[in-house]
Amino acid sequence: MALTLRQIAPKSIFGRSVLIIILPIIVMQMIVAYIFFNAHWATVTANLTESVAADVAVATQLYSRDPTVANADALDALLRPDMQLSVRLKPGETLPTARRRNFFSVLDKTIGRALSNAIDLPFWFDTTRYPHHIDIRVQVNEGVLQFYAARDRVFAPTGFVFIFWLVTATILLTLVSVLYIRRQSIPIRELADAADAFGKGQDIGAFKPHGAAEVRRAGQSFLKMRQRIRRHLDQRTLMLAGVSHDLRTPLTRLKLALSMAETKEDIAHAKRDLDEMEAMLSAYLDFAHGAGQGTPEDLDLGDFVIGIAATEEIQATVAGPVEIEARPQQLRRALMNLIQNARKYAGEPKVVLEMTDSHVQIHIDDAGDGIPEHMREEVLRPFARLDEARTQNIEGVGLGLAVARDIAQVHGGRLKLDDSPEGGLRATIQLPR
């Protein structure tokens, strides 16, 4: 039962707030209506119906003293003006066998009980046939004595007025509550949109905290957190850029000195070490720049993937054209990292583009040895270096897959590793449409 309620309950704060406010209002109005009808309206209606039933019983007794049409007409002339009760004799007729039920069953029950207590003869009544009268018939020896009683004499009409105003008040309170809650939920939605944009490396625009005190406080805390994160990223970039710049100068001098020295085997090894060190510095600096650079733009992902595959001279299977919003340079960087990583450790990979209604997937498949399932999460971490794993985009640097994952996350997607149909590893970049 709890699981069912959890599934039915609204997921948004707007829906839950509306439910919290509207549900008590509806329950309260139902309780008030129930108490009113049982404690007041039903009592008043019972008193009225007993009065009408008593009048019908008296008229029946007066008729039984002189069971003629003339006497019935005389009773009609006597009762119609002041008591709003019409009497007519239908000689030779019998009571109907069927009766239509009133929507308010309590009215039928009350009239039936009152007539049963007041009249000993068989009777029949209908509260639905006429809009302003109640049809009551009593079986007598000569036929059927038919009475028409004004509806206002049988039940209190103020009950419907009360229900009308009760429903009207509920609707008005609901509308006011919905409008108020809607205004309160707007700042929360704006804060969520700003946080989502910041997480994707986009500009949050002219976001300004407003709304309730708690929401303003959350918005201000978000802006302070954003400033701290940006300051941290700037410091990281400056630090790595400075380190790279400072180390490039002695590396350049060493490379120049080695190039002028006589060629020997140990000098060749030193040159290779210097080249690897320089490549490592470039990778660190590239990683420090982050994955959120560039401006998002509309991109035909099908043509984009085909272009990369043609440049790298690998096989590509594209389901069809699909338009998404992406940063082309960063997305190209992620795909090149995955392609080069697969090519280095497993030969020529294949690129497959698939799409669904909600997202697109770019698969990089290879036929290598793959990566054990328990190690796949580890290889996505920056600077991860596992024995016999394929984590490096550049020799000695464990940043290729980490950079690709960051770029996928900046685009609102993710990078996942799985078994490839080719027998090796499948690296998949999944992006929202």
Image: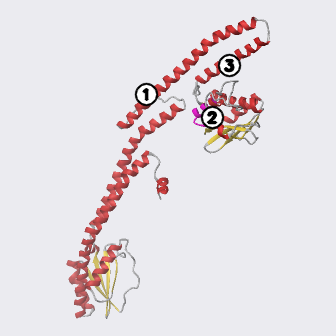
- Pointers 3 and 2 in contact (C-beta within 8 Å): no
Occupied quadrant, residue 351: top right
Q: Earlier in the sequence, mark 2 or mark 1?
A: 1
Residue at the spot x=67%, y=10% of the render? Answer: 252
Does residue 106 appear to the left or right of 367 in the view shown? Answer: left
Residue 279 disc label: 3
Q: Which of marks 3 and 2 is nearer the N terminus?
A: 3
Compared with 82, 369 (above or below) is above
As for residue 409 lying within the magenta part, the answer is yes
Residue 378 disc label: 2
Q: Is residue 208 visible in the rendered structure shown here? A: no
- The answer for how far apart the CA atoms under marks 3 and 2 are is 23 Å
Closest to the observer: 165 or 426? Answer: 426
For disc 1, the neighbor class at 10 Å (few under 14, some 14 to 19, many from 20) is few
Does residue 43 appear to the left or right of 406 in the view shown? Answer: left
Q: Assign a secondary structure to mark 3.
A: helix
Q: List the residue tagged with mark 1.
A: 224
Q: Assign a secondary structure to mark 2.
A: helix
Q: What residue type is labelled 1?
A: Lys
Residue range (magenta): 403-416
Badge nearest the viewer, 3 or 2: 2
- Pointers 2 and 1 in contact (C-beta within 8 Å): no
- The answer for how far apart the CA atoms under marks 2 and 1 are is 32 Å
Q: Which amino acid does label 3 sit on?
A: Ala
